[in-house]
Image (cartoon, rainbow, N blue to C red):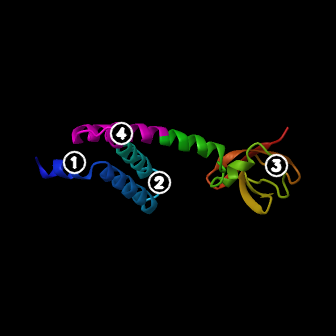
């Protein structure tokens, strides 16, 4: 019996639980909710071994299969949870203004101008328009808002 086999058989269920806890700790140090799912798989292998002790080869295969399943389902869960909570426009502030109509305080000259929105002044691009014209924000180009005359 090799040292590898002795290690796996000697640790048994406790070894898998210990590996799961170590992987949870790695998740804390390296955030990104990736090692968490490997930790879940290791804990599940430990639970299976508590019910029915398996040979180490089967444990490794079970860990691999459970890791793939837990990573895929975990990523699906996190993506679904992310869309239900949080602010999708948090780091794209200009995109929040798309579709809104504002009144120009200053004219758009040679295709560029300035627009005051809330507490921020945005550089805008669009057709030349006089001050007081109503504009519709169509989108964002870098740090500029793209506008057109509102109907």
Who comes first in sequence, dot 1 or dot 2? Answer: 1
Which structural element holds mark 4? helix
Which structural element holds mark 3? loop
Using residue 33 as the reference point, say whether residue 113 is left or right of it.
right
Q: Is residue 126 at least partly visible in the picture?
A: no
- Disc 4/disc 3 C-alpha distance (Å): 75 Å
Disc 1: which residue: 9
Check disc 3: other Cα within 10 Å, few if <14, some if 14-19, many if 20+.
many
Disc 3: which residue: 129
Q: Is residue 13 at least partly visible in the picture?
A: yes
Who comes first in sequence, dot 1 or dot 4? Answer: 1
Q: What are the residue bounds of the magenta stretch?
A: 48-73
Residue 151, given in percent of the width and then of the height, sits at: 85, 37
For discs 4 and 3, the disc positioned in front in the rendered view = 4
Instruction: Inspect the magenta stretch and tell me whether residue 68 lies in it.
Output: yes
Who comes first in sequence, dot 4 or dot 3? Answer: 4
For discs 1 and 4, the disc positioned in front in the rendered view = 4
Residue drawn at x 78%, y 48% is 128
In contact (CB < 8 Å): disc 1 and disc 4: no
Label drawn at residue 32: 2
Disc 4: which residue: 51
Residue drawn at x 10%, y 46% is 1
Q: Residue furthest right?
A: 132
Residue 39, given in percent of the width and then of the height, sits at: 40, 50
Residue drawn at x 26%, y 38% is 54
For discs 3 and 2, the disc positioned in front in the rendered view = 2
- Disc 1/disc 4 C-alpha distance (Å): 15 Å
Q: Residue furthest front?
A: 51
Q: Is residue 142 above or below residue 50?
A: below
For discs 3 and 1, the disc positioned in front in the rendered view = 1
Residue 106, given in percent of the width and then of the height, sits at: 83, 58
Which structural element holds mark 2? loop
């Amino acid at each position: 019996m090799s040292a590898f086999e002795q290690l796996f058989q000697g640790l048994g269920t406790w070894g898998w639980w210990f590996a799961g806890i170590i992987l949870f700790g790695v998740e804390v140090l390296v955030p990104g909710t990736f090692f968490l799912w490997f930790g879940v798989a290791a804990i599940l292998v430990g639970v299976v071994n508590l019910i029915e002790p398996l040979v180490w080869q089967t444990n490794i295969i079970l860990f691999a299969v459970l890791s793939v399943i837990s990573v895929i389902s975990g990523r699906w869960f996190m993506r679904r949870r992310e869309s239900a909570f949080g602010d999708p426009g948090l780091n794209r502030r200009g995109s929040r203004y798309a579709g809104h109509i504002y009144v120009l305080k200053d004219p758009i000259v040679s295709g560029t101008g300035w627009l005051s929105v809330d507490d921020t002044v945005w550089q805008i691009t669009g057709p030349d328009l006089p001050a007081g014209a109503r504009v519709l924000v169509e989108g964002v180009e870098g740090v500029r808002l793209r506008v057109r005359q509102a109907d």
